[in-house]
Amino acid sequence: MGLDTVDLNAATLRGIPVIYTPFANANAVAEHAVHLMFGLARQTLAGDEAVRGSRFDIRDSLIGFELRHTTLGIVGLGAVGMRVAEVCHKGLDMRLWLLIRSHSCQPSILSHELILCVSCYKNPISSRCIPAHL
C-alpha cells in the first residue's frame, strides 16, 4: 500500500495531485474488518443466498458462533491492525494473539493478561479469525 504503485511523474505531468494519507481511513478499514468477522461468524452470506433462493429449510444448518471470549490472531500491527485489536479486545473481550516479525512487542494495548504477543517465526497460532493487515 502507499505510493509504490503510482507513477508520480506521470501524475505530475498531467496535473493530477497525489496525496499520501496513510492513517486517514484506518478506523474505517478496521471497522470493516470487524464487520466481515461478524459476517463469517454468523454465516450471513450463506443465509442471504438461501433466503434469496427461497431455501428456507437451510436455516437450522446455519449455526454460527459468538466472537465474544474467542481468540483472535492479528498479523500486522500497523494503524489498522492495532485498531482491530482495540475494538475486539475492549468491545468483545477477545483474547488476542498479536503476531509480529521481531522479538520485541511494545504496543500500548499489551497491558492486559489476555493479550499475547508472539513471534510469527516461533509460535503456531490457534484462533477463530486471523485478519492480516499488511
Image (cartoon, rainbow, N blue to C red):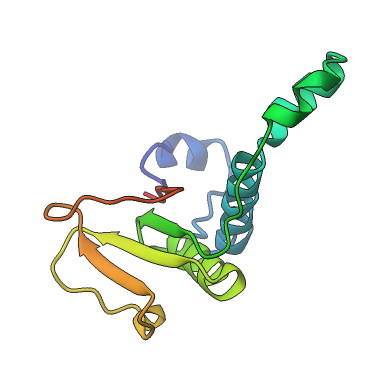
Q: In the picture, residue 31 is in which quadrant? A: bottom right
Extreme residue in the bottom direction: 111
Q: Residue at position x 41%, y 51% from top?
A: 133
Q: Residue at position x 49%, y 66% from top?
A: 94
| x then y, percent, for residue 110 | 35, 79
| x then y, percent, for residue 18 | 53, 49
Seen in the picture, residue 108 relative to 98 is either above or below; the reply is below
Seen in the picture, residue 94 relative to 50 is either above or below; the reply is below
Q: Nearer the viewer, residue 70 or 24?
A: 70
Seen in the picture, residue 30 relative to 55 is either above or below; the reply is below
Seen in the picture, residue 73 relative to 5 is either above or below; the reply is below
| x then y, percent, for residue 83 | 51, 67
Q: In the picture, residue 57 is in which quadrant? A: top right
| x then y, percent, for residue 16 | 58, 42
Extreme residue in the front direction: 60
Q: Residue at position x 27%, y 79% from top?
A: 106
Q: Nearer the viewer, residue 15 or 115?
A: 115
Left or right: residue 33 versus residue 62 is left
Q: Residue at position x 49%, y 43% from top?
A: 12
Left or right: residue 56 versus residue 1 is right
Q: How many marks?
A: 0
Q: Nearer the viewer, residue 120 or 59?
A: 59
